[in-house]
Image (tube, rainbow, N blue to C red):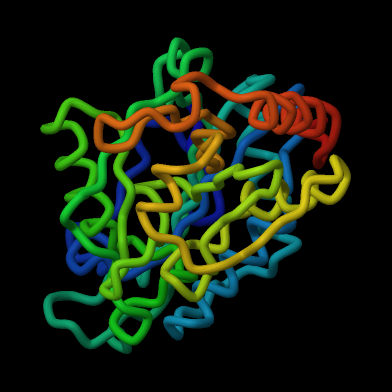
Amino acid sequence: MKIWLDGELVDESEAKVSVFDHGLLYGDGVFEGIRFYNRRVFRLEEHIRRLFDSARAIVLEIPWTQEEVCKFVVETVAANGLDDGYIRLVVTRGSGGLGLNPYLCKRASMFIIASTISLYPQEHYENGLAVITCATRRPAPAALMPQVKSLNYLNNIMAKVEAIQAGALEAVMLNEQGYVAECTGDNIFLIRDNVMHTPQVSDGALDGVTRRVILELADQLGVPVLERQLTRYDIYIADECFLTGTAAEVIPAVELDRRKIGTGKPGPVTQRFIAAFKELAGSTGTPID
C-alpha cells in the first residue's frame, strides 16, 4: 500500500509520524473520510472544503491549497490501483514537543490512506440494524464544536463501546438537553407519514456530506423534510429509520432499545433512498484517471 505523507507517496512500512506529533499526543488535528466508486472520488471538493473549514475553526493552517489536496487524494487512490474504497485524510498540528502550546508546532503534517472499509456486516444493510440509546452524551457546542471533524473522537468511541457491550453495533447519542444528536459515526433520519425528519446540526449533529446528499435526494424524490429537535419518542413511533455516513453509506435501523421501529424491517422510503444514493454515488465524482 502506498501512503501519501507530507508531499510524497511512501510504502506503508515507511509511513510514520513523530511520537511528538500533537495529533498523537493531544488529538490536535482534523480529518475526513471520503468514498470512491468506479474510479471516481465522491463529493471530493465538499470533503476538502469541510476539512479546511475544520482546520480554520481550530486555528490549524494547512500548508497546501484545497486544489492541491484534491490532487493529492486522486494521486493516492491511483497509486493503489483501487476501483472502489475509502480514503482517510488526516491533518495533524505537527511535531511540537511536550506541552499543550500549539504554536510550538512549526508545520502541520498530513497523510492520506486509500484502502477499503466495511463498517457493518452486509446482512445489516439487508435486514437493518438494532440500535441502543447510550448514556454517553454529545459535548455541548461551547465545549467541542460538532461541526469540526477533529481527532478528538473519544466521545464517539465510548458511545461505540456502550453499543457493543449491549450487543448492538450502533448507538443513538443525545445532547445534554436530551434531544437526539446523531449516532456514534452516522447521522440519523426518520420517516413518519411519508415525511422525513432529521436533527438540526445545532443539536450536536455533524454536518455530514452524506447527510447533505440525502437532503438533496429528498427534494428529487419529492419527500418533504423537517430539520428539527427530535427525542427518542420520535424514533420509537417512526415508520422507518435509517443512518447515513461516508463509511456507513445508507443503512436501515429497525430497532431502538429492543423496540421495533415500524414493521421491524427496512421500509419502502428507506429503500428508495438507498437505491437513489447508490445510483448517484456510482455515476458521479472526480475521475481518478
Residue at image position (50%, 31%) is 2
> Is residue 145 left or right of 102 when viewed as pictured?
right
Q: Is residue 205 above or below residue 133?
A: below
Residue at image position (19%, 65%) is 20
Q: Nearest the camera: 164 or 209?
A: 164
How many numbered discs, if any?
0
Q: Nearest the camera: 248 or 243?
A: 243
**In this view of the protein, can residue 9 be seen by the observer?**
no
Residue at image position (55%, 45%) is 190
Residue 3: where, in percent of width, then height?
A: 48, 38
**In this view of the protein, can residue 138 be seen by the observer?**
yes
Q: Is residue 243 above or below residue 17?
A: above
Place residue 221 in its image quadrant.
top right
* Picture quarter with the C terminus: top right
Residue at image position (55%, 41%) is 244
Residue 262: where, in percent of width, then height?
A: 49, 30
Residue 90: where, in percent of width, then height?
A: 44, 55
> Is residue 17 left or right of 71 when viewed as pictured?
left
Residue 181: where, in percent of width, then height?
A: 40, 61
